[in-house]
Image: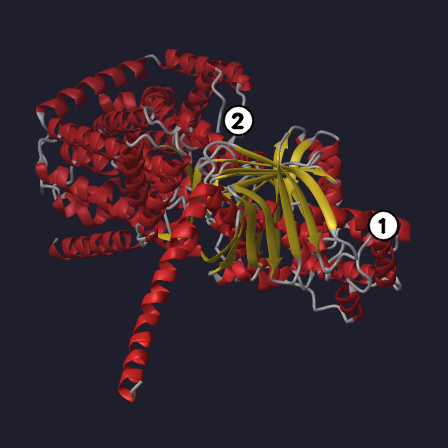
Amino acid sequence: MSRVVRLAFLAAWLCALPLAAAHAGEADDAKLAERIAKLRAPGVLEREFVETKQLALLAAPLESRGVMSFAPPDRLRWETREPEPSLLEVAGDVVEFSKPGAKPRRIDLTREPGARGLVDAVRLLLSGELAALRRDYELALSEDGAHWRLSLTPRAAALRRVVARMEFAGVADAPRELLLEFANGDRSRVLFEAAP
Amino acid sequence: MNARLVGAALWLALALGVTAQRWQVSSEVPSLVASREHPQLAELSRRMASGPAARTLALVFSAPDSVDALSAARELAAEFAARGDVEHVSLGPPAEALAALEALYFTHRFAFADAETQRLARASEHELRGAARTLRAALAGPESSWIAQHAARDPLLTFRAQLARLEAAQRGALETRTGQWATADGAAVLFARTRASPFDATAQAPLLAALEEARARLTARGVSTQLSALHRFAAEAQQTAQRDAQRISLLSLGAVAALFALLFGSLRTLAAAALQLALALSTASAVCLLAFGGLHPLTLAFGGALIGVCIDYPIHLAHHHALAGDPRGPLATLRAVAPALVVGALSSIAGFAGIAISDLPGLRELGVFGAVGLMAGLAALWVIAPIFPHALAPTPAQQRLAAWLARGYAGLCANRGACLALLAGICAAIALAAPRARFSDDVFALNLPPRPEWMAEEARVQALLGAGERGRFVAVMAASDDEALERLEALAPRLGAAVAAGSLAGFDSPHALLRSPSAQAASERALREPGFAARIERAFSAEGFAPGAFAPFAEELARPAPAPLRAAALAGSPLADALAALRVPLHSGVAWVVTLRGVSDPAAVEHAVTSVPGAEFVDQRRLAGELYAGYRAQVMPLLAAGIALVALVLAARFRSLARALAAGLPALLAAGSVFSVLALRGEPVTLLHLFGLLLVLCFAEDYGVFLVEARGAGELSASLTSIVAASATTALSFGLLALSDFPALAALGFTAGLGSLAALVISPLTAAAFRSSRDASLLR
């Protein structure tokens, strides 16, 4: 092959690279959009959960159990039943936190960027709000057959000071796991099971 | 004449200039309150009346959708923020509030540990394991990410507890939604602080007008609003007083003009009288504005009524000039009647001077206004006299009136016994009725009664905000903040006991924001208990915490305690507004205010408070009532002394018991008659009734003096017609005042108006009873 022909092939290959990358990006976007669309809860979604926290403060992981429910577009309920019962209810930008024997406390999410980031991630995913998710997080999807993992890295510095990364994982259309990596190195893993 | 007129013009220009430049009307109730016995409380009342809390108005926005309510609050906040008369607008806590509070308090968290945490520092490992389980439970809950950030340095969650106390102190019952203040049921709340005092009604009028327009606009959009603002009460009081003053002044002037036209038929005489009134009132206003910095609406309306007294002087002069004038002109006539005018005016001025030395600023203002007004009115006669026609021919009406009065008076003189019997009857009636009088010392009742619907709205908003009672609080005064904070700390358990006993629903003490340096040091010391960090380590490890997890906590405890947190550090923080409402700098120290909620047993709360030095349970209404009662008790002997002084002046002037009685008795009997009427009506006698009686003493004594000073038939006729005309103008102006919406002005008007009629009847009776032989011969 002449030197000229080899250079022509090389040029053609170099020119084709971005095109191929663009096609791959489009394919990823389509998959992401498809995944997010499948995550959208059609009605009230209710799951039992087991949360395992690995905190630097604790010698052993700390486990809690309860029930989570989501009612589109923005109502989230997180009921911890063990080891200490507590209830966290989110409606719009207001969080109400209550424990037996204590006066309920309301928190304005607009004033708590850390808490808002966590709540928004769940709400936006379960509402299928791809544009909003892209606005607030860097998204990365990986799939292996029916198994998928979606990673969310906060764009806002205020949220990054609390949460370094979130990862949702599931099988087919069902979210099964939420992994939270906190800025201080603590980790929390929540496993979801369909409520009986 | 020209020189006098130029002098009058300059005088008037100066007085009006000062009045226009310094014009300031303030209906502040505490300005009526001051005391030698409670100088610090009086100063505190004054400062609180124009302090940040009093200058702050609160608006609550409600709509079916709370988003609309929040949006309406933002809209109005933007409008307020653009106004020059609004100093500060608060839609919600500052965005960086939590970070700012953390920066302030986290370092000092050991200094603000509660009693239980301080006790735990000495507690056994077993007890500390309970605290470890609490932390573990908190970490298992949904707040764990926030708690985990601080727990290594704060395992007992002292900072979290302090934040909760600060939130309660800063917000009351409010929470935030989308960063805005909101009530529990989703109504939006907006606070706006005005630059001027809420009692500066002139300054507040444009803001209140804009506010009403905005509220109407929002109502049309389905957003209802509720307002809590002292400003509108003050504005209404001022508007009512100004309306009353204008109405009374205009009607009085109209009546006086008609009377002058009827009796004298001379425009120049009317112009002279108008100039005399203008000089008297503008001088009194200017002096009061210079002396007190402002005029209370009460003084303003009282000024309108003073027309009725001041006009007596030109009326007297005009009648004498027309009926018994000196052919050399009005100045010569004035010289002839001057003794009567001066004796009459001086005794009235002495009466007002008695009020002017009061230690109640509002009453002092009234006394100064009256004394200066009468002095200026008297002095103005020498300036305006040349305006009178050189010779003033009596009009037919004046002649007919003079003749009719002379005949009537002659009839009285011919029946001296009947006159004496009538006077004795009046004395007996007074003696029987007067003891039935009852006094009222409610100083707030002097002001315009607040509209019930506004009061209800005020109460609703205050309840929504979780605010303390208005007008009832505990003030802790001391030479320094440190001392005051120590006293607050001594007070808190006592108030806590009052809450436990049901005497009080609750209280908010500033010591949630700041503790005394000694209490901070004690708390720091308590947590630095030897071995505490090691016990924490063992107890928390036993409950599953990682070994060494609380090393940062142990390291901080090993370091020296930071310098105590002081009030100055809070000034630039998100707590600045809360601090400004609770801390009031005084001339000789500082006062800190503890707000109270639901005081059901004031005596028990007062008892709980009195054992703490410098602490006072302040019930502003009761305090004002006590001061007012004290003043009334003080003013009664002053009145009696004034009457005795006037009697001495009359005795010295007339050197005859009969003449002195003829001149002075009408004043006593007229005032006594009005007092008896009040007693028989069952109307509580207020300080303003007493002022009305003082006015009655003033002009009734004038009438007596005018009659006694008459030296011939012409002068006697002139005096008779002048007291009828004077009484008519006085009854008219004060009668109009009796229609005022201001209870104080109505009381003053009723008393003085009735008194002028009583004086009109009694003064000729008295003169006839004691001067019948001379006056009968004069009239013959």
Left or right: B725 as drawn, with respect to A18: left
Residue closest to the far front: A1
Tell me if residue B181 comes above or below residue B247 in the rendering. below
The front one of B300 and B415 is B300
Chain at tag 2: B
Disc 1 versus disc 2: nearer the observer: 1
SS assignment at label 2: loop
Residue B271 in view here:
yes
Task: Reply above or below: B141 against B95.
Answer: above
Q: Amino acid at mark 2?
A: Ser
Residue A32, disc:
none
Q: Name the residue at 15% across, 56% down.
A: B6
Residue A165 placement, left or right of B751:
right
Q: Residue at x 37, y 24 (%)?
A: B750
Question: Residue at position x 48%, y 49% from top?
Answer: A110
Toward the viewer: B290 or B90?
A: B90
CB under 8 Å between discs 1 and 2: no
Q: Position of residue B699 (x, y in %)?
A: 34, 32
Q: Is residue B355 visible?
A: no
Read off the residue under disc 2. B440
Quarter of the rendering occupied by the C terminus of chain B: top left
Question: Residue under mark 1: which chain is it in?
Answer: B
Residue B454 lies in quadrant = top left
Residue B617 at what x, y percent from top left?
65, 40
Indicate the position of residue B775 as horizontal and vertical percent values. 29, 24
Q: Which residue is mark 1?
A: B129
Q: Does residue A188 sit above or below B436 in this rendering? A: below
Nearer to the camera, B175 or B515: B175
Q: Is residue B685 left or right of residue B133?
A: left
Amino acid found under the numbered disc labelled 1: Arg
User: Toward the viewer: A54 or B478?
Assistant: A54
